[in-house]
Amino acid sequence: MRGGGNREMRRMMDKMGLDMKELSNVQEVIIKTDKKEIIISKPSVTEMKAKDNSIFQVIATSYEEKELEVPIFSEEDIMLVCQQANVSPEAATNALVETKGDLARAILLLSTK
C-alpha cells in the first residue's frame, strides 16, 4: 500500500463490515487444553469483530506453560468408556487417568477386572 496504508486498511475493513479495536489493560490470557495451560501475562490483545464472530489476536513477549496434574477428558470420551466397559463415569475417569487418556487401554483395563 502507498503512504496512507493504515487509513486505506481501515477503510477496507469498514467496507467489509469488520470493526477492530485494541483491548486496554489486559492483565492475563489463559489458554487451556486437556493437558496444559498457557498463561500469557500482560499481552497486547486486539479484537476484530465481524457480523456474528470475534477474532482475538494475542501478542506476547513471554508466556508460561503448566502441565496439568490431572488431564481433562471430554464428556464424550468418558461416556464412551462407560458404555463400552459398562462402568460408572467415576470409574471411567479413573481408568482414563491411569492410562493417560488412552481410550482403548482404559476400556481393556476396566473390562479385564
Image (cartoon, grey):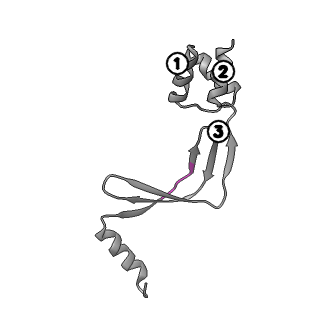
Q: Residue at x 57, y 22 (%)?
A: 81
Picture layout, residue 42 above or below residue 68: below
Residue 10 point in image, percent of width and height: 37, 73
Mark 3 is on which residue type?
Lys
Observer-nearest residue: 109 or 3? 109
Q: Magenta part mainly helix, strand or loop?
A: loop
Could you classify mark 1 by the number of other residues whose Cα lies within 10 Å: few (under 14), some (14-19), or many (20 or more)? few
Q: Which residue is mark 2?
A: 108
Is 89 contained in the magenta span?
A: no
Earlier sequence position, callout 3 versus callout 1 = 3
- Numbered circle sitting on residue 35: 3
Helix, strand or loop status at disc 2 = helix
Stretch in magenta = 24-29
The image quarter in which residue 66 lies: top right
Earlier sequence position, callout 2 versus callout 1 = 1
Observer-nearest residue: 108 or 43? 108
Q: CA distance from mark 2 to mark 3?
A: 22 Å
Q: Which residue is mark 1?
A: 83
Residue 113 point in image, percent of width and height: 69, 11
